[in-house]
Image (cartoon, grey):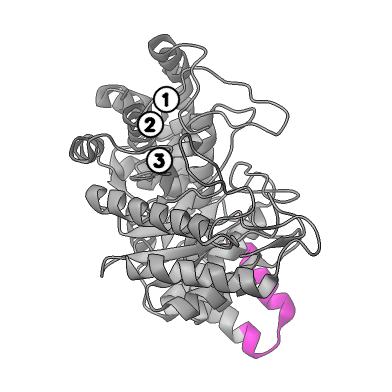
Amino acid sequence: MLIEQRTIAEHNDQLLSQHTRRFAYTAENITGIKSVLQKLTDFQVAIPSWALGTGGTRFGRFSGGGEPRNLEEKISDVGLLHQLNRSSGAISLHIPWDIPGDAGKIKALAAQYDLRFDAVNSNTFQDQPNQKHSYKFGSLQHVDKAVRKQAIDHNIEVIRHGVELGSTALTVWLADGSCFPGQLNFRKAFQNTLEGLQEIYAALPADWKVFVEYKAYEPNFYSMTVGDWGQSLLYANKLGSKAYTLVDLGHHLPNANIQQIVALLLNEKKLGGFHFNDSKYGDDDLTVGSIDPYQLFLIFNELVEGMDARNMNHANDLGWMIDASHNVKDPLEDLLQSVEAIMIAYTQALLVDTNALRSAQENNDVAKAQEILQQAYRTDVRPIVAEARLRSGAALSPLQLFREQKVREQLIKARGEKTVATGL
């Protein structure tokens, strides 16, 4: 479903006077505000097809109703998000959860909502119906060559689907690892995985990238075959120039310095992109910025500084995506909040006085460096983000309009109260 543009305009008219005052006050002290607004307009965050339904825990799942029952309805939901904020212009599919029955029709439907297809994601962490071999003891690492071949073939099939949709990247996350000491030969598991990734890499079209995602633990707890950024980087370096590391903010041990990881991967030209979320303990998959918004800002500070140092395009040279599981929130409200948090942190990072910060660093002026960062972080940039939305034709307050229009109630009426999103 979409909201009539007239309704968005009326919503904006009601808030315009207050917004205009707030924006004028904030923008008055910002140098290069036009450039900042243009960067915000260009910046798009992909929505994963699996985040449009209610998530769950090992103990239960509680549907919120009105969840998308097929890929077409998922595209419709992302189209709604993009209409509300004009910053969600891409959708990322998980195969085989969301295999297009007719790629041409699906691609045309996405275009109607002004959406493109971001990276496609393979799945070798679940056994699918009629699957010949099980991934219980791993996929690309498996001791059985037949299992490894099945996982390789699946990834190549995912690439084929992506080509049909216009995607240009494959994300590989492996649940491979071990739960107990002695269960796995680490060296053989690494070599098996590398050889499998090499076959997948060889199947990439010339203009494609492959992102190797890492995770510290879960579902295996003693070891993970791609357990940290160093292992991912090792695979990426061995694969070639089209292979990169993908950073999921929740895939680290507590207190990991993700911003330093980002800086080093950028320095090595091996940072491929992000899965944004937030966490208190591990892969909590919470709303972006809900636990540690300052860390999110610090990550974006490293991104902006590092990308500018390499003359990279902020909008296109890295992959930006949300990866979250909404257990107690309306998934669409959660995604609106997450995109907003990303845009706020990005804007704050754009306001950092990099020349002054560099000078403070060169002079070992620790207090000054802290003040420069916190000056940008403590700036209320919400009027700037809202102004970028306004100029793009989106809603000044997307979540407020979502609730005013009773969107979830309309979705429940159209789809049913007991629906469960496909793939979950």
- The amino acid pointed to by label 1 is Pro
Question: Is residue 330 in sight in this rendering?
Answer: yes
Which residue is the site of mark 1? Answer: 68
Extent of the magenta region: 360-378
Determine the image quadrant of residue 330.
Answer: top right
Q: Residue at x 64, y 83 (%)?
A: 360
Q: Position of residue 271 (x, y in %)?
A: 48, 70
Disc on the earlier residue, 2 or 3: 3
Disc on the earlier residue, 1 or 3: 3
Contact (Cβ within 8 Å) of mark 1 with mark 3: no
Which residue is the site of mark 3? Answer: 20
Most foreground residue, 162 or 372: 162
Which residue is the site of mark 2? Answer: 74
Nearest to viewer (mark 2 / mark 3): 2
Whether 282 is among the magenta residues is no
Disc on the earlier residue, 2 or 1: 1
Q: What SS does tag 1 mark?
A: loop
For label 2, the crowd category at 10 Å Cα-Cα, with few meaning under 14, some 14 to 19 and many 20 or more, is many
- The amino acid pointed to by label 2 is Lys
Q: Main secondary structure of the magenta part?
A: helix
Q: Position of residue 20 (x, y in %)?
A: 40, 40
